Image (cartoon, rainbow, N blue to C red):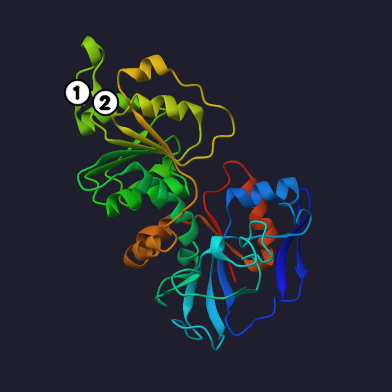
Amino acid sequence: MKSLVITAPGRTEMLDVEPPPAAEGDIVVRMKACGICGSDVFYTQIGGIPPRQGATPLGHEPAGEVVRVGPAVTGVSEGDHVVLNPMAAADGIIGSGGAQGGLSELVVVKDAVAGVHFRVIPAEIPWEVAALNEPMAVAFHGVNRSGAGKGTRAVVFGAGPVGLGAAIGLKSKGAEHVVVVDIVPNRLEKALLVGADAVINSAAEDVAERLKALHGSEPGFQHGPSRPLTDVAIDAAGASAVITTALRSLRRGGVLSVVGVHKKPVELDFQEMLVNEPDIRLSMGYPTEIFEVTDSIIADWALYQHIISDRVPFAEAAGAVDLAATPGATDKVVVVF
């Protein structure tokens, strides 16, 4: 079968490889779509992930069709459409240092258990939308970490794929009003398409002042400047300036959930923070959300399709990684088979 593999730092190749053998407890899935993530770009740049450095199969956002079901497997049939949990694979994380990658024609799910390793989805969901399941689980974990629920007034910083997924997640949890902040106009347009109640272009507007108008305000500590009554801020941008703005955009005791990856240390002003007592929570991966988000995708897949910016055929998968690595060139790239 064909498989996209990192063969050297900065280099991927489409190789002919033998598919893993399938046992009676396994299912074989023919890949139909797989998203490209920023971590795929990072893995390529550094030449792979130990212990597979120099020979790392790529792709950890897989969706596909079941083409073989071992006799010991229940809850799935040949022909079913499925999304996979790459973290649960018995032979290592799919596409992130494990023996297999989702940017391959076939993936064998070993010792497959429904609801743990895979989830069957309706056939009408487009494959490229199904491939959003894994990154949207990351977004939903950030929402869950924030504690957002019915009546929450929230702001999401960053209208990339995870930020847009967080906006959908907040609304699905019953948030009363969700604002999305970015500096790219077409990203803000997408935020409205996926259900945000309002957007703010932070290059043109003062975020805190606009949030006061949208969410109301409360007096500042000891006659200090007033603050928005925003309950939750989600950082899906990973920029230090966002942290400063977000902390100034929350009500006293509000929650900042950090999903974005910060590549440099962030400076915090504890003196300023002290009087407002913000709760900062870090969010990593998706401990429980990988199939929780599937319900949301099943219910609202038409919203999620707006997140996808580029659909690239599998034969050009190496170019899809290069496209995702080009700053400003795209938002969400999905390889389709």
Residue 61 appears in the rendering: no
- The residue tagged 1 is 218
Residue 104 appears in the rendering: yes
**145 in relation to 77, above or below:** above
Label 1, label 2: how many angstroms apart (C-alpha)?
Answer: 8 Å
Quarter of the figure that contains the N terminus = bottom right
**Amino acid type assigned to the residue bearing label 2 in the image:** Arg
- Which SS class for mark 1? strand
Circle count: 2
| Disc 1 and disc 2 in contact, CB within 8 angstroms | yes
Left or right of residue 270: residue 89: right
- Which SS class for mark 2? loop
Bin the neighbour count of mark 2 within 10 Å (Cα to Cα): few under 14, some 14-19, many 20 and up: many
For the view shown, which residue lies furthest in the top direction?
Answer: 223
**Between 91 and 302, which is closer to the camera in this rendering?**
91
In the image, residue 10 lies at what x, y percent?
A: 76, 48
Bin the neighbour count of mark 1 within 10 Å (Cα to Cα): few under 14, some 14-19, many 20 and up: some
Tell me which corner region of the image, top left, top right, bottom left or bottom right, holds residue 119.
Answer: bottom left
**Between 90 and 19, which is closer to the camera in this rendering?**
90
Q: In percent of the image, x 41 and y 50: which residue is there? A: 141
**213 in relation to 153, above or below:** above
The earlier-in-sequence mark between 1 and 2 is 1
Q: In percent of the image, x 46 and y 51: which residue is there? A: 138
Tell me which corner region of the image, top left, top right, bottom left or bottom right, holds residue 321.
Answer: bottom right
Quarter of the figure that contains the C terminus = bottom right
**186 in relation to 272, above or below:** below
Q: In percent of the image, x 64 and y 56: which residue is there? A: 96
- The residue tagged 2 is 252
